[in-house]
Amino acid sequence: MPQFNYIAIDNKSNSINGTIESPDRGSALASLTRQGLRPISIEPAKTKRTFGFGSNKVKSEDLVMFTRQLSAMVSAGVPLLRAIGSLHDHTTSKALEKVTAELLHDVEGGSALADALEKHPETFNTVYVNMVRAGEAAGILDDILKRLATQQEKNASMRKKIKSAMTYPTVLIVITIAAFFGLMVFVIPQIGNIVRGLGGPDAKLPAITEMMLGLSSFIISYGIFILIPIGIGIYLFRRYIQTPAGKLWLHTMILKVPKINAIVEKVAVARFARTFSALMGSGVAVLESLRVTARAVGNKVYENALLDAAEQVKNGRNLSSIIEKNPLFPPIVSQMLSVGEETGQTDTVLVKVADYYEEEVDVAIEGISSIIEPVMIVIMGGMVGLLAAAVMLPISGMANQIK
């Protein structure tokens, strides 16, 4: 929705600057008037572009801190407006400062906190908004914010562990590719010139040397014609996997890759258990909890499975029996869900499932990292061995001829 910057006078003759979302300038003027303000100037807000040198997105650690501090202040009896205002005044994040300023303006204008949060989907996802809405309806906003902060900390911790575990293999892969093309373009041609200079133009070179020289010549001559189609292919592939059909295909393929599929399954189950338990514990209805959780899992295959489960629950079936028949979910999930349904403590038992699978993710990541590192070292060693063989074999042959 379009945004408008305004300057207005309140009933105490104070000047107020702010931003308001409205379909058009006339609607913005009417909205400000309803709030008891006298608009002086209303202009369309200009969209800021970062051109890759910055980001207006709130970082996950800043969002966790915001949620934790807001929960503490609301629990201590601080009025919501004053709590948001305090967080706005003391935050060091420019992105969060902008978001909290708009939250403060909307809540001052009479909006519920959940409605104000819903205007910033890039910062507050559907899980966050739905839990806050449930907390406001039940009068337990402070408890809901504590749950949200805990959930976000767990999710952020999992993401950091996955990123840190994949950093070293990624660096090795990049170095390996760069070293390969560097050798093919700069080193192998020089070695070929030296070898041919020693043995003469009619010298018979070993097959491995001829292969390396031929590959090097091909890359130098036609490399640009290879890189352009590869670049276009990567661009089109990225565009495709951003579509619903592309995401479904990619996530289905990932679930078929050995070792990787185990990590993806554990991450998806952990997210399902923690998100669904948080929503259920907040008082959100089962169907709405399932639909929101489906969008938060991060895998289209699991999302479709949970949306299908929601339809079956709507028809009167127990969630535990539905999950039990789905091979995407381990047996422990359906068993714990069954216990939760019998005791009325679904949120409590699912938290234990989430904790268990988050620990399993750590173990699986360490295992895959321990496999990737030696494999990449062997590949790099093989490249060095091929280069050494391509150089030493012709020199050794020429030395034998001289003898």
Image (cartoon, rainbow, N blue to C red):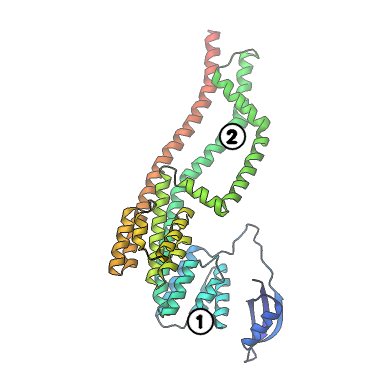
Q: Position of residue 392 (x, y in %)?
A: 52, 20
Q: Which residue is mark 2?
A: 181
Name the image quarter holding residue 204.
top right
Q: Amino acid at mark 1?
A: Leu
Q: What residue is rendered at 60% in x and 29% in y?
A: 187
Instruction: Decide: few, some or many residues near mark 2? Use Cα within 10 Å; few <14, some 14-19, many ≥20.
Output: some
Instruction: Decide: few, some or many residues near mark 1? Use Cα within 10 Å; few <14, some 14-19, many ≥20.
Output: some
Q: Amino acid at mark 2?
A: Phe
Label 1 SS: helix
Report the mark closest to the observer, 2 or 1: 1
> Given the current orientation, which residue lies at the most extreme bottom position?
12
Judge whether 24 appears above or below 215 on screen. below
Q: What residue is rendered at 40% in x and 51% in y?
A: 265
Mark 2 / mark 1, whichever is N-terminal: 1
Tell whether 90 sits left or right of 9: left
Q: What residue is rendered at 61% in x and 50% in y?
A: 239
Q: Quadrant of the N terminus?
A: bottom right
Judge whether 62 appears above or below 115 on screen. above
Please state which of residues 162 and 383 is positioned toward the viewer in this rendering. Answer: 162
Distance, label 2 to label 1, CA atoms, is 59 Å
Judge whether 332 appears above or below 80 on screen. above
Label 2 SS: helix
Q: Position of residue 394 (x, y in %)?
A: 55, 17
Please state which of residues 162 and 180 is positioned toward the viewer in this rendering. Answer: 162
Find residue 81 and name its label: 1
Tell whether 191 sits left or right of 376: right
> Given the current orientation, which residue lies at the most extreme top position?
403
Asked if the residues shown at circle 2 and circle 1 are in contact, with their CB atoms under 8 angstroms apart, the answer is no
Please state which of residues 182 and 18 is positioned toward the viewer in this rendering. Answer: 18
